[in-house]
Amino acid sequence: MNHSLPVYSHYKRLQTKEVAIGNLPVGGINPIRLQSMTNTPTLDTRATVEQCMRLFDAGCDYVRITAQGPREARHLAVIKEELYKKGYTRPLIADIHFSPEAAEIAACIVEKVRINPGNYTDRKKGKTHYTEAEYKEELERTRERIAPLNTHLPGAWNSSSHWQQPRFAFGTNYEPIRRYPGRNGTGSPGIY
């Protein structure tokens, strides 16, 4: 009887571009990076900082923290400062659910911002089929609404008064797939 497990070490990685996320780049020839997310209230500094430390100590390269609104996004600076004081300098990622304003604030504080592009589109509930012209118009409006993030991307604050290159990622809750069937394949959980 053979009790050996299948060998998963023989795989070929997709060729990807390297993306700088704080002091730990991802993609390219870099190792696979681990990311996790806190489940504490963002405004609870002590609980969030402690959970970030546990995640980093367990081997996470990045920790994602939700920022539901502008108040929580501004509070990321407090969390980041506390982590720096304790010697934790790995990148933080803001997870933005509904507020483009929160994304703009977070882009000035953390190394990466995860947004849902559906938050930047028109809210046409129930509409799932678009003409080519309507689709192009909505894409253009979305680009215009996301553009303010770019004003924050050239540099971001960190507690050492260094400027760094933050990045933002498009995450999906599959809203684009529901709204634009046939245009997104099976979708993607995130695009960097």
Image (cartoon, grey):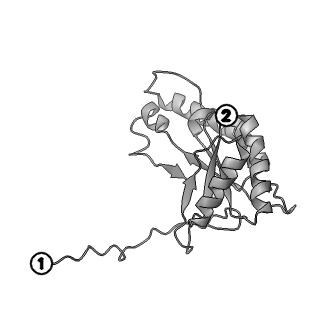
Q: Dot 1 lies on which element? A: loop
**Rendering coords of residue 136 (x, y %):** 55, 34
The amino acid on which the numbered mark 2 sits, given as a three-letter code, is Ser
Which of the 4 quarters of the picture holds residue 96? top right
Residue annotated with mark 1: 1
- The residue at the point 50 percent across, 21 percent down is 125
Residue annotated with mark 2: 99
Q: Is residue 67 left or right of residue 163?
A: left
Of pointers 2 and 1, the one earlier in the residue sequence:
1
Separation of residues labelled 2 and 1 (CA atoms)? 57 Å
The amino acid on which the numbered mark 1 sits, given as a three-letter code, is Met
- Closer-to-camera residue (6/154): 6
Q: Is residue 3 above or below residue 110?
A: below
Check the picture and name the quadrant holding the N terminus: bottom left
Is residue 154 in sight in this rendering?
Answer: no
**Rendering coords of residue 66 (x, y %):** 63, 43
